[in-house]
Image (tube, rainbow, N blue to C red):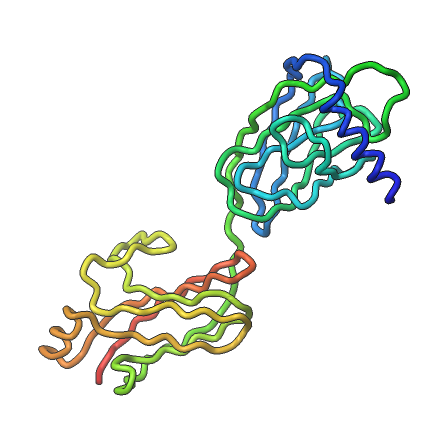
């Protein structure tokens, strides 16, 4: 394994020292973001170009690994094609449709792109220069539906004079952030909801590093205090959201009757 990684690095380094003039590869590519730090890049290679290495450019992201199922090759960050931050180097031609899985960290700031080349994982014995093709900008095919997470919320809020608000207990299965808002009234309310323009209550978000019960404090706004003083009760809807640390999210809507 160590020898193969060294060979891949040596081959990739050749890109910087013995490269032919760039030319269009004819490749096209698309990519889809995964829900847990992965991207799938689908490359339609051109029948008229020979290529064994594909460099990847992912603005805002750090590529930790690349895998191409069914293909012999190695992930490398050494001696890369210009404008790329990681590459997949193979000993065999990459032909037809190639599906690369990228493991990444960070937040994207631009489109993913590729730079194909003729470099091989194992250095060739000939002195022929490596051809580095023109960069190709990939097209995003959209992001998948966000995965959901289940959590529970007590259906009633209890007044706590010391907190100057009502307490709502939320039980979550993993770490993340629990928040709540009084949503804007709508029969077709998107998730997450927009906040009502003049809410009666406000809630500060609570973070947790693991699964447990957390308590939200629902406090009246100045408008809520005026309504409470006048009617003695507040009738509000509360949208509770849990954003799990693994990217999943969940939403629950409560109808609360709030009295001191």
Residue beneath the point at 69% across and 19% down = 132
Which of 9 and 230 lies nearest the eye of the viewer?
9
Where 152 sits versus 12, above or below? below
Residue 71 seen in the figure: no
Query: Residue 107: horizontal and vertical position, in percent?
Result: 51, 46
- Is 166 left or right of 84, judged from the image as shown? left
- Is 259 left or right of 113, judged from the image as shown? left
Where 230 sits versus 140, above or below? below
Residue extending farthest to the left is 230
Residue 53 sits in quarter: top right
- Is 3 left or right of 27, judged from the image as shown? right
Q: Quadrant of the N terminus?
A: top right
Query: Residue 9: horizontal and vertical position, in percent?
Result: 79, 34
Residue 4 sits in quarter: top right
Q: Quadrant of the C terminus?
A: bottom left
Which of 83 and 207 lies nearest the eye of the viewer?
83
Query: Residue 14: horizontal and vertical position, in percent?
Result: 77, 25
Residue 87 seen in the figure: yes
Where 61 sits versus 235, above or below? above
Residue 117 sits in quarter: top right
Residue extending farthest to the bottom is 161
Residue beneath the point at 64% across and 26% down = 82
Residue extending farthest to the right is 125
Residue beneath the point at 48% across and 78% down = 213
Residue beneath the point at 87% across and 22% down = 124
């Amino acid at each position: 394994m160590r020898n193969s990684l060294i060979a891949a690095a040596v081959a990739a380094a050749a890109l910087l020292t013995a490269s032919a003039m760039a030319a269009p590869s004819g490749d096209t590519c698309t990519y889809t973001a995964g829900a847990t730090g992965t991207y799938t890049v689908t490359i339609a290679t051109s029948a008229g170009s020979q290529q064994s290495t594909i460099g990847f450019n992912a603005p805002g992201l750090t590529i930790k690994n690349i895998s191409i199922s069914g293909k012999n090759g190695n992930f490398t960050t050494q001696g890369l094609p210009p404008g790329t931050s990681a590459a997949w180097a193979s000993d065999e031609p990459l032909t037809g449709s190639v599906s690369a899985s990228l493991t990444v960290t960070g937040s994207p700031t631009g489109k993913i792109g590729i730079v194909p080349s003729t470099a091989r994982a194992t250095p060739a014995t000939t002195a022929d220069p490596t051809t580095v093709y023109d960069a190709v900008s990939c097209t995003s095919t959209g992001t998948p539906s966000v995965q959901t997470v289940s959590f529970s919320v007590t259906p009633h809020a209890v007044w706590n004079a010391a907190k100057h608000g009502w307490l709502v207990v939320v039980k979550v299965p993993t770490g993340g952030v629990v928040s709540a808002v009084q949503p804007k009234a709508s029969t077709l309310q998107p998730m997450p909801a927009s906040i009502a323009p003049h809410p009666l209550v406000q809630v500060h978000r609570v973070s947790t590093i693991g699964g447990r019960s957390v308590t939200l404090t629902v406090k009246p706004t100045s408008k809520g205090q005026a309504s409470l003083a006048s009617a003695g009760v507040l009738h509000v809807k509360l949208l509770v959201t849990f954003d799990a640390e693994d990217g999943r999210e969940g939403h629950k809507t409560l109808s609360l009757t709030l009295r001191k």
